[in-house]
Every structure is written in C-alpha cells, then in structure tokens.
C-alpha cells in the first residue's frame, strides 16, 4: 500500500508521532502495536514488549526476520530512554519514509475532500496550484504556478494537453498552499491534525525533517500491455516518479493487495 505498509499499516502513524515530537510513541508504534495479520511469534513478541517494555527479553523473543525492529530494541537495551537515537539507527530511507508516509496520508485526506466536494481532479479551479510539465512530459515539482482568474483559461488548456498538472500539498516546513476552495481544503486538513510548518523540522532526527512539496492529483499510466494465458497474466506499464505500481495493480485485479 502507498507508503503505509500492508501487514502492519503503521508507517504514517510513526511519522505523525515524530512530527508531533512524541518519539517514545513513535518507537513503540514501530516495534510494538501488534497486527492480527502477522504470524503468531511476531504478534506475541510485540504484545509482550508493549506490555512489559523489557527490551532484553524482546531481543530474545523477536524473530530474526524483524531485522529493523531488533536494531531498535538492541539500541534501547543498551541506551534506555534514547528514543531519538533508536530511530536514528534505522536506515536513512526508512527514517525518511516515516514522515513521507504521514505527508502522503495528509495528501490523501485532501484529495478525498476535493472529490467529496465534486471538484474535478484533472481540471483546475481558481486558487489551485499547477505543476508545469518538464521536457519529458512529467510534472516539475520544483515549479509551481498559481491559478488565477486571469490565467484560468490558459491553464485549463495546458492541463487538457498534459502540459500542466493540478496539485495538492505534501505539507512540510516550507510548503506553499493553494488559495480559494482548494486552499480551504488544505488548511482544514492541516488544522484538523494540529500541524504547523515547524513541526516538520526535527533536529533530533535530521533525516525525518521535510520541507514538503506539491504532488499531482492524478497519476497517469502509459503503455499498458496485458498478456493473458490460461489462469495467468502479465501486465507491463509505465508510471511517473512517485506513483505506485501496486496501486494500479489493485485497480486492475480488484483483489487484496497482499496477493501481489
């Protein structure tokens, strides 16, 4: 699933705890918080750790396949109470993914509210921010163009021609928010979560800091090809940067994401 995980979809919850400054909660969500979808040994080990906070015992109980959890537990066994350090022992890309997952969660809330209001995803309205296409036809996330009454007609044509893309915020410390109705949606989601830009500056864990950006609302696939033989089929397609093949496969297969 998009950044969140499938068996234990907690990555965005860990990210929320990090930006809220509750690093102990972030760690316990990651190494505790058992899931019914896990195997019995993993679930029992997480339950015991969450209950007892006995890190030495957890090192004995946690299966070796939970490599990253064991890294965190081992650190806390040697350095009790250093929750920032415990997160910092994880690979850099995983540290970053926690906060990125939370940003994606917020993005999804904003996207859902736009859909609930009947505002199109592939046509701009006044107040939107669009991303112009780069030389390869992909959204340029470093260039952001506000939509006004003056340029609305031009931007509508550019979006229709795939030369610009309607966007929503991936909220961070330096985010640019939309105006108008889309701005209301973005600000309401941020306020509901009790967030401010400075929350995404995490000096204790620098890799978890995020300036934020904007991301296109619609991810288009290209060159879709299916090969079907008996009860098997192969799919090939092209997706732009930041789009998830598993999400497209879910829509094609209409089955549980764990099946693929």
Image: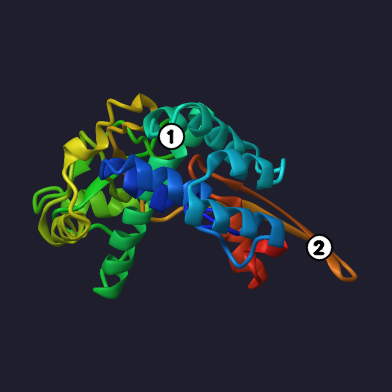
The residue carrying pointer 1 sits among few (fewer than 14), some (14 to 19) or many (20 or more) residues within 10 Å by Cα, namely some
Is residue 256 or residue 26 the one in the foreground?
Answer: 26
Q: What is the quadrant of residue 251 in the picture? A: bottom right
Q: Nearer the viewer, residue 20 or 192?
A: 20
Residue 59 percent coordinates (x, y):
63, 39
What residue is drawn where x is 36% and y is 43%?
24
The spot of residue 128 in percent (x, y) is 20, 52
Q: Is residue 51 left or right of residue 202?
A: right
Q: Is residue 255 visible?
A: yes
Quadrant of the image containing the N terminus: bottom right
Q: Earlier in the sequence, mark 1 or mark 2?
A: 1
Q: Secondary structure at mark 2?
A: strand
Q: Quadrant of the C terminus?
A: bottom right
Depth check: 22 or 214 in front?
22
At 81% across and 62% down in the image, what residue appears? 233
The residues tagged by marks 1 and 2 sit, at their Cα atoms, a distance apart of 35 Å
Residue position for label 1 = 96
Read off the residue under disc 2: 233
């Amino acid at each position: 699933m998009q950044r969140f995980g499938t068996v234990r979809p907690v990555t965005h919850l860990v990210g929320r705890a990090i930006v809220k400054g509750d690093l102990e909660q972030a760690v316990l969500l990651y190494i505790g918080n058992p899931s019914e979808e896990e195997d019995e040994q993993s679930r029992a080990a997480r339950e015991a750790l969450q209950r007892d906070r006995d890190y030495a015992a957890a090192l004995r109980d946690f299966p070796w396949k939970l490599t990253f959890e064991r890294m965190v537990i081992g650190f806390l066994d040697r350095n009790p109470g250093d929750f920032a350090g415990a997160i910092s022992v994880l690979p850099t890309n995983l540290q970053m993914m926690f906060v990125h997952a939370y940003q994606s969660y917020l993005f999804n809330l904003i996207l859902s509210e736009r859909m609930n209001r009947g505002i199109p995803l592939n046509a701009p309205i006044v107040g939107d921010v669009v991303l112009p296409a780069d030389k390869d036809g992909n959204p340029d996330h470093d260039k952001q163009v506000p939509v006004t009454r003056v340029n609305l007609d031009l931007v509508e044509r550019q979006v229709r021609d795939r030369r610009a893309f309607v966007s929503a915020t991936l909220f961070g410390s330096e985010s640019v928010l939309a105006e108008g109705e889309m701005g209301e949606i973005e600000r309401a989601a941020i306020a509901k979560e009790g967030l401010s830009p400075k929350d995404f500056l995490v000096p204790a864990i620098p890799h978890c800091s995020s300036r934020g950006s904007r991301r296109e609302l619609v991810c288009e696939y290209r060159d879709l090809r299916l090969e079907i033989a008996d009860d098997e089929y192969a799919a090939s397609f092209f997706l732009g940067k930041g789009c998830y093949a598993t999400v497209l496969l879910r829509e094609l297969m209409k089955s549980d994401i764990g099946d693929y």
